[in-house]
Image (cartoon, rainbow, N blue to C red):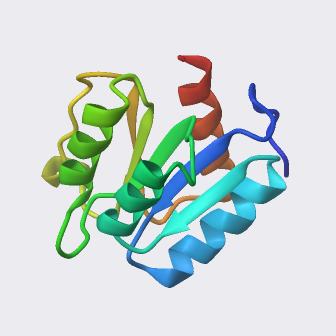
Amino acid sequence: MTVPLLRSQAAILVVDDDPDILDLVEILVSEAGLQPHCHADGDSALAALDRGDCEPALALLDILMPVMDGHELADALRQRRPQLPILFVSGFSPRRVSISDEGGPTALLHKPFRPQQLLEQIRLLLEQV
């Protein structure tokens, strides 16, 4: 099921408060030849980024999370890395979700998603960089 990606071994910052989604995305991204850096909240993701633990080629963010939602996290990430591609994931209806394309490339993937859909969205965003 591997989708060819432009940057083999590229780091992907994955932030979702659902441990099942984190586990699934970690497996899929790893099998696609990428390096997932998974976090359950925005604060730990930003701390890891600020420490230099991860130099992401793309961020995959859940929109609805406690404390810091995906939009707030995206704003903080874009302050640090203005052109960072961001893939938002959401279980909400498309009518209830809005994303901004200010800064780097941005896309939205609705839950539940098929593995192929996730990997294709990652590939498309990485191609835009």
* 124 on left or right of 78: right
Residue drawn at x 65%, y 32% is 123
- Residue 129 lies, with reference to residue 70, above or below; the image says above
Q: Residue furthest front?
A: 51
Across and down, in percent, residue 17 comes to 38, 76
Residue drawn at x 41%, y 68% is 16
Of 29 and 109, the residue lying toward us: 29
Residue drawn at x 45%, y 50% is 49
**Label tally:** 0
* 122 on left or right of 83: right
- Residue 80 lies, with reference to residue 22, above or below; the image says above
Across and down, in percent, residue 21 comes to 52, 73
- Residue 119 lies, with reference to residue 28, above or below; the image says above
- Residue 33 lies, with reference to residue 70, above or below; the image says above
Of 59 and 52, the residue lying toward us: 52
* 67 on left or right of 44: left
The image quarter containing residue 5 is top right
Across and down, in percent, residue 18 comes to 43, 79
Across and down, in percent, residue 48 comes to 46, 59
Q: Residue furthest bottom?
A: 19
* The C terminus sits in image quarter: top right
The image quarter containing residue 96 is bottom left
* 69 on left or right of 118: left
The image quarter containing residue 27 is bottom right
